[in-house]
């Protein structure tokens, strides 16, 4: 028995020694992607400081690596791609996750280097591809798969790609967090760090988004239909802090597999004049999971590893320079007629007190039905939970579930908080 134990200990020591000598891919220049590779073009990325610390300490060894076509791994084009993995044990003893100090989420992302951040009034064509393995299951309530974010800590994210599996949302959505504006907050935007002492950076407050303008990109079932395949994303964006009424010329256009999904015109960056030219847009991607389980799953289920691959992350100044032919598309044949308006507009909960009656506020909810574009039902009242429940119940009475599938087509299109009598 002692001999066996000695062999195990020796094996672990040799493994750790080998790992310490071999530099982790996320610690390498441009996260291990060489300049001749087609995997990243037009910008450079690196890991978060927290992830770097955990890797150097030997506590995290699997969250990211470069993958190779020659090894039979998924590659969209060329010779390499990027593999991201998350597990429920992606945590340090003090509760810090792979990339930030928050107990409610775990993440493995790479971040845009400062020199490649995008300025106000700049325009880009951006592309990337995501491979969903055949055994991929969304055990978690939510997984983020890429976001355009403000580079200044107190400012919120701008545009986020999120995959949901919960009782209120299901499917792949694009969040526009810009159009509703921002509000000064001292509770970290309703996030996990609710005390001033835990806020990131030097700021003792945050500018928080007030509303989410959500575009439904595909259902969870449709997303699963792409398991074992690549999803190709193309974004044509002009960054602008001004609205159209103020003379702004911003837009955000999105294509998935050549089909235009979003055709938005308007403000694309938050107004952050206090930061002047220092305020820019950054991009980060990988996996960003909530710890909470999704509908139909338990805490035990979310211990399963989650893996996705990214490839062909390009940023250029024109569609022609994307060289889409390598992916089977062309600029001339990209689809048109994407959504100009969001599917859902919702008020963000900034840790409002639960007793709404003491706040002299009311909530307005608008419910629509995806199968009847003319249907609209609006309710207002003192309780956010009650008005949402009442409106959905009325819709479901109008459109009962006769098939037994559980899908009545009813959904919350708009939920907002207003002053009483407004």
Image (cartoon, rainbow, N blue to C red):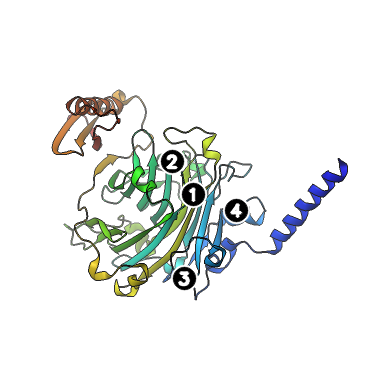
Residue toward you, 285 or 352: 285
Q: Which type of secondary structure does the marked residue at label 1 adopt?
A: loop
Q: Are marks 3 and 4 in contact (CB under 8 Å)?
A: no
Image point (55%, 57%), residue name: 64
**Could you classify mark 4 by the number of other residues whose Cα lies within 10 Å: few (under 14), some (14-19), or many (20 or more)?**
some
**Could you classify mark 1 by the number of other residues whose Cα lies within 10 Å: few (under 14), some (14-19), or many (20 or more)?**
some
Question: In the image, is residue 32 above or below residue 176?
Answer: below
Residue 61 falls in image quadrant: bottom right
On residue 200, which mark appears? 1
Image point (24%, 67%), residue name: 333
Image spot of residue 377 (x, y percent): 16, 31
Asked whether the viewer can see residue 364, the reply is yes
Image spot of residue 110 (x, y percent): 49, 58
Whichever of labels 4 and 2 marks the residue nearer the N terminus, that label is 4
Q: Nearer the viewer, mark 1 or mark 2?
A: 2
Q: Which type of secondary structure does the marked residue at label 2 adopt?
A: loop
Q: Which residue is mark 2?
A: 191
Q: Are marks 1 and 4 in contact (CB under 8 Å)?
A: no
Image spot of residue 307 (x, y percent): 51, 51
- In the shown orientation, is residue 201 left or right of residue 369? right
Q: CA distance from mark 3 to mark 4?
A: 23 Å
Q: Which residue is mark 4?
A: 62
On residue 233, which mark appears? none
Q: Which residue is mark 3?
A: 78
- In the shown orientation, is residue 369 left or right of residue 207? left
Q: Nearer the viewer, mark 4 or mark 2?
A: 4
Q: Are marks 4 and 2 in contact (CB under 8 Å)?
A: no
Whichever of labels 3 and 2 marks the residue nearer the N terminus, that label is 3
Q: Which type of secondary structure does the marked residue at label 3 adopt?
A: loop
Whichever of labels 1 and 2 marks the residue nearer the N terminus, that label is 2
Q: CA distance from mark 1 to mark 3?
A: 39 Å
């Amino acid at each position: 028995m002692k001999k066996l134990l000695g062999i195990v200990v020796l094996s672990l020591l040799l493994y750790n020694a080998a790992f310490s000598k071999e530099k982790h891919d996320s610690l390498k220049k441009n996260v291990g992607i060489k300049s001749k590779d087609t995997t990243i073009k037009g910008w450079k990325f690196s890991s978060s400081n927290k992830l770097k610390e955990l890797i150097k300490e030997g506590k995290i060894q699997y969250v990211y690596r470069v993958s190779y076509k020659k090894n039979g791994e998924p590659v969209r084009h060329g010779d390499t791609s990027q593999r991201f993995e998350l597990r429920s044990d992606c945590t340090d003893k003090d509760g810090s996750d792979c990339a930030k100090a928050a107990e409610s989420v775990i993440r493995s992302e790479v971040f845009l280097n400062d020199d490649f951040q995008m300025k106000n009034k700049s325009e880009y064509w951006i592309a990337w591809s995501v491979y969903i393995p055949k055994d991929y299951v969304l055990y978690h309530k939510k997984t983020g798969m890429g976001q355009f974010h403000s580079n200044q800590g107190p400012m919120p994210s701008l545009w986020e790609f999120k995959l949901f599996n919960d009782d209120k949302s299901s499917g792949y959505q694009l969040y526009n967090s810009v159009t509703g504006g921002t509000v000064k907050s001292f509770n970290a935007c309703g996030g996990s760090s609710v005390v001033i002492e835990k806020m990131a950076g030097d700021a003792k407050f945050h500018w928080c988004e007030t509303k989410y303008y959500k575009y439904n990109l595909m259902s969870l079932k449709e997303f699963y239909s792409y398991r074992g395949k690549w999803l190709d994303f193309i974004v044509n964006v002009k960054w602008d802090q001004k609205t159209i009424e103020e003379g702004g010329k911003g837009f955000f256009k999105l294509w998935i597999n050549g089909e235009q999904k979003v055709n938005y015109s308007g403000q694309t960056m938050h107004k952050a004049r206090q930061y002047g030219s220092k305020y820019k847009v950054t991009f980060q991607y990988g996996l960003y999971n909530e710890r909470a389980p999704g509908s139909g799953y338990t805490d035990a289920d979310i211990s399963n590893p989650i893996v996705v691959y990214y490839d062909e992350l390009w940023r250029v100044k024109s569609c022609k320079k994307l060289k889409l032919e390598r992916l089977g598309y062309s600029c001339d044949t990209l689809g048109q007629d994407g959504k100009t308006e969001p599917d859902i507009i919702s008020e963000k909960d900034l840790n409002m007190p639960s007793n709404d009656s003491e706040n002299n506020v009311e909530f307005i909810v608008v419910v629509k039905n995806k199968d009847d574009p003319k249907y609209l039902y609006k309710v207002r009242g003192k309780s956010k939970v009650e008005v949402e429940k009442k409106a959905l119940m009325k819709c479901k009475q109008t459109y009962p579930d006769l098939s037994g599938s559980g899908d009545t087509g009813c959904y919350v299109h708009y939920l907002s908080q207003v002053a009483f009598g407004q």
